[in-house]
Image (cartoon, grey):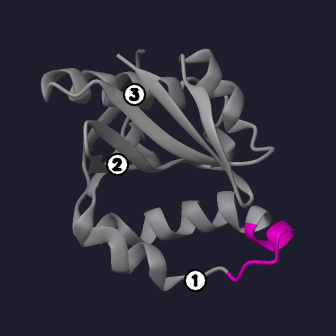
Amino acid sequence: MPGFSIVPAATDELHFAKRVSRENMEKYYTVLGWHWDAGAIEASWPATENYSIFARDVPIGVLRLRPDADAIYISDLQIASGNQGRGAGGFALAFVERLARERGLRHIRLRAFTGSAAIRLYQRAGFGKIADEAGKQLFERTL
């Protein structure tokens, strides 16, 4: 998809990742009666593979991955609200698929909040729901 790129995130991009994650996820936390923990992303940052998603030269999203047995687990895929629906999410999922194949992994897994508009993206990309959890659903795509 022209115009998008994904590169390893620099530590100084953590601020952007925290902001876009909060903008996208805080409403789900509120509905579920959960408290948004601003430090959770920063605390988990060193344990994940972190990527920045760009449209041209402008940062529009963040992708965070971690190993999960025989899979890559998408810990976070956030696209800034003004850039959603333009193909960046699909571009990021294709990037993760390439990584999984290169690493010899057979699955990609992720969680999404129940009722999230992103679920349609995941289903179009071939993910199927494998479990319901409190306020979330676990999805998997077999490669």
Looking at the rendered structure, the kind of residue marked 1 is: Asp
Q: Which residue is mark 3?
A: 4
Q: Which residue is mark 2?
A: 52
Could you tell me if the residues under marks 1 and 2 are in contact, i.e. CB atoms within 8 Å? no
Q: Label 3: how many residues lie within 10 Å, few (<14), some (14-19) or many (20+)?
A: some
Looking at the rendered structure, the kind of residue marked 2 is: Ser
Looking at the rendered structure, the kind of residue marked 3 is: Phe
- Marked residue nearer the N-terminal end (3 or 1): 3
Residue occupying image coordinates x 30% and y 37%: 71
Please state if 19 lies on the left or on the right of 6 as rendered: right
Please state if 19 lies on the left or on the right of 31 as rendered: left
Report x, y in % for residue 100. 24, 28
Whether 13 is drawn above or below 139: the answer is below
Q: Nearer the viewer, mark 1 or mark 2?
A: 1
The span from disc 1 to disc 2 (Cα, nearest Å) is 21 Å
Report x, y in % for residue 109. 44, 38
Q: Which corner quadrant holds the N terminus?
A: top left
Whether 90 is drawn above or below 43: the answer is above
Q: Is residue 55 visible?
A: no
Whether 12 is drawn above or below 3: the answer is below
Magenta region: 29-35
Residue occupying image coordinates x 65% and y 79%: 36
Q: Residue furthest left?
A: 103
Q: Nearer the viewer, mark 3 or mark 1?
A: 1
- Marked residue nearer the N-terminal end (1 or 2): 1
Report x, y in % for residue 26. 71, 68
Report x, y in % for residue 111. 56, 47
Residue occupying image coordinates x 38% and y 21%: 94
Name the disc covering residue 122, or none. Answer: none
